Image: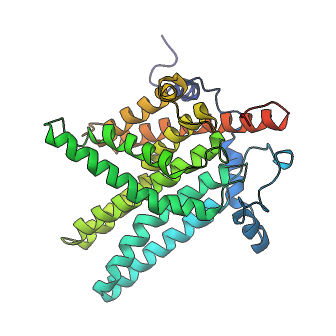
Amino acid sequence: MNENNGKFNWKKIFFVFEELGKVGEGEGFGDFNFNNLLKGFLKKKTDSEIEDSLIVGTEKTTPEISDISLKYPEPWLFGRLLLGSIILFYGFVAVYKQFEVANLIPAIILTGSFAVPISSLFFFFELNIRRNIPIWHVMRLVLMGGLLSIFITLLLSQNVSIFNGPTGAWFAALIEEPAKLITVVILVKNKKRYPYILNGLLFGASVGCGFASFESAGYALTYGMEDIDSLIGLIQLRGILSPFGHIAWTAIASASFWRVCKGEKIDFNLFFDKKFYIPFIMIIFMHSIWNSNSVIPFQGVYFILGITSWALILSIVNLGIKQISLEKGGKIIFKN
């Protein structure tokens, strides 16, 4: 009799998770340690340390490659922002419940739709150990990227419908993912200045954050016209899922493209490099399943897809750290 009968085999689950880290010629998760991640959340920081972590990316505040720490990042600002955003959202909800002032509904929509996605975005900001992207550039991508990606999505959707192409929630992935990647490529003009894999990861997360936030605000407004409880419920669900959806998908797509582009001019052949197209096809596939009517109970499909997305992200982070390590060691990574 097999002694594993009736027992959940965690080793197989971890094996699958590790194999996902090798997709698209990935190299696994490197020095990632979940315990260290939790330690980062709990670390105490002074106001000066917080300011230093945010004032980066300018000519005077971008460190030399020789000064870059190759220690696996331990994001801590993300946790503080996440806690603060949750308190802010439920604070507005509590005040509304007490006084039922309609003027508070926009505050609930805005804090609920933007707070958690932007908190998640700071996780990617902290993962960018090259520290060469200023926060204003990130926020510009959130706002302008959100607008442009939605515009391109609507433009493509209308053209598909004109020619009687396929429609439906599952098909949205085939339009939205290319639209968001196109947006990143258009808005990040100086690719030679930001050629690193971890730069691409942050740029993609920024555009994904803008897209997800504006989309959530739109859905929330629609639901809020009918029932405030439905509005709050929708925002809660989308807030919980936001780190695993558009932000993660666009981060993966952008970082994969940055990996093959290396700060050079856009070459059509880059899209046929399996280091790019395998992860990109995967996120389109995951997005399609995400939008489908899953039969897995307890929102299990979101859990499975979320784990898959983050396995790809951790693999990309490992590749990004290795890229910087090789450059720091004297290897020529980018052309002059």
- Identified at 85% across, 49% down, the residue is 67
Task: Work out which quarter of the rendered image holds the C terminus and state it.
Answer: top right
Q: Quadrant of residue 24?
A: top right
The residue that appears at 61% across and 60% down in the rendered structure is 78
User: Percent position (x, y) of residue 79?
Assistant: 61, 61
Outermost top residue? 1
Q: Is residue 296 left or right of residue 122?
A: left
The picture places residue 237, in percent across and down from the top left corner, at 36, 57
Which quadrant of the structure image shows residue 331? top right
Residue 184 in percent (x, y) is at: 49, 48
Q: How many marks?
A: 0
Q: Residue 257, image x and y in percent?
A: 54, 35
Color scheme of the displayed model: rainbow
Confirm whether residue 173 shows in the render. yes
Q: Nearer the viewer, residue 258 or 10?
A: 258
**Can the viewer see residue 297 in this picture?**
no
Q: Is residue 242 above or below residue 98?
A: above
Tell me which residue sits at (59%, 30%) in the image.
260
Report the front residue among 83 and 5. Answer: 83
- The relative height of residue 282 versus residue 248 in the rendered view (above or below) is above
Occupied quadrant, residue 92: bottom left
Image: 320 above or below 13: below
* Residue under the image location 27 percent in, 70 percent down: 229
